[in-house]
Amino acid sequence: MLLDSDTQLNQKSYYEASAQREPLSEPLRGDIMADVLVVGAGFAGLSAAIELAQRGYSVVVLEADRICSGASGRNGGQAIVGYASGQQPFEVQLGRAGARLAWDLSMQSMELLDQRIAEFQIDCDHVAGYLYVADSQRKARALEQELQVLERDYGFQVDFARGQAVQRHIQSPRYCASAFERRSGHLHPLKFGLGLARAARSLGVQIFERSAVLDIQRGLKLCAKTSGGSVGAQWGVLAGNCTLGEYGPRVAPELAPRIMPVGTYIIATERLGVELCERLIPGNAAVCDNNFVLDYFRFSADSRLLFGGRVSYSTRTPANLSERMAKRMAQVFPQLKGVAVDYVWGGFVDISMNRAPDFGRLGGNLFYLQGFSGHGVALTGMAGKLVAEAVAGQAERFDVFAKLQHRHFPGGALLRTPSLVLGMAYHQLKDLL
């Protein structure tokens, strides 16, 4: 998931250019009360607000910028089953039964995504189909082994192909193996997020844009202060990801060492035409490789290739970004060498140390949702549902994630980023070799 920043690209994304926003809502003015305060109007915050409102709670959402202007409205649009960490952290820490429940919740998050789109009639270009690819024999073996374990232990089946058979799914000389499944898919993330906001408002949720939280007073009652007013509430949900802790308003500094912002970027080509798109990816699936520093791409509803994956671990935007990403794209699809790039944008994805989601409580009445690590399009919906269940007193499913232990990134505030740069350089070298 991506987050705009002054240090990142400020060009208009393809999503902003192809979605219709409602007029900017008024910022918070004065002091109000609610049952639940939600900080952040992205997928997780809006999903929590919807679930809470449907349970009869009064909900106020405070957003520092605009609805889905950060992570949720700028990501690759890939709705993926499973977790960026794989199942290992769940199996090691929670045992087989806990890991199975986590997997089932991931599958249910895909069902919830479908349900929300249908229930609230959200037009977001949703397409089913996902293709995992490998660009070396070593990576092909790793992909096959991983998927065999998922089939054996969790019943997850894919169509695995090697060699020339890969061309059934993608016309690219780069990949020697692929695995296709229909449970995952892709969508227009900003259209989806704006649809969630409309749904929340229809249920009585109050959303205040340009209302950054400057401080939260904790206790039996919570009080969130902005420059224009305050919200008092019995319960709170922090759903700001990278904007929490040291990367934004310091409302939860204790969470900052557990999350690292990684810059990632996307280009959108000129319109390519339906015929070419159908030839390059016959099933119109979203595609992702299994390198540590991965490429991910898909076609938009208006026949553009959206190609992402160039990353920065230093929070600095790489030089000549559009040209370098276009070159990478042409290595995947030589047929697209020289096509025009109409849009380029980027921002931060929030990752946890083990790439497993990081959900929990600060005190008894302030919940947080972070660390989606690139799997947030679907998982944020389930996160919102689980936190609403916990507020209502049914925390068993929320605690599957809350029980996970998360390590701090090494190096402290000053050395965490340099340490990560070195570590990621090592993994990039491994991928190249």
Image (cartoon, rainbow, N blue to C red):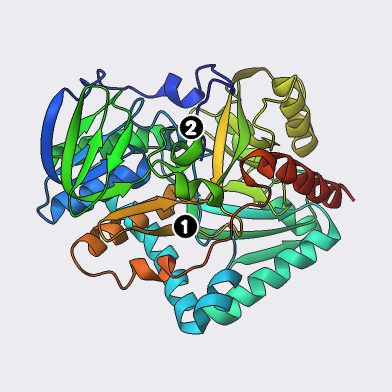
- Tell me the SS state at disc 2: loop
Q: Give x and y (percent) for residue 294.
A: 69, 46
Q: Which residue is mark 1?
A: 358
Q: Is 334 left or right of 303, judged from the image as shown? A: right
Q: Answer whether residue 117 is visible to the viewer in this image.
A: no
Q: Give x and y (percent) for residue 397.
A: 34, 70
**Location of residue 296 with respect to 96 vertically, above or below:** above
Q: Residues within 10 Å of mark 1 (few under 14, many from 20)?
A: many
Q: Nearer the viewer, residue 160 or 20?
A: 20
Q: Residues within 10 Å of mark 2 (few under 14, many from 20)?
A: many
Which amino acid type is marked by label 2? Arg
Residue in the picture at 50% in, 32% down: 3
Q: Is 175 left or right of 182, judged from the image as shown? A: right
**Location of residue 11 with respect to 362 vertically, above or below:** above
Q: Which residue is mark 2?
A: 74
Q: Nearer the viewer, residue 278 or 373?
A: 373
Residue in the picture at 36% in, 33% down: 191
**Location of residue 229 with respect to 368 vertically, above or below:** above
Quadrant in which residue 189 is drawn: top left
Which amino acid type is marked by label 1? Asp
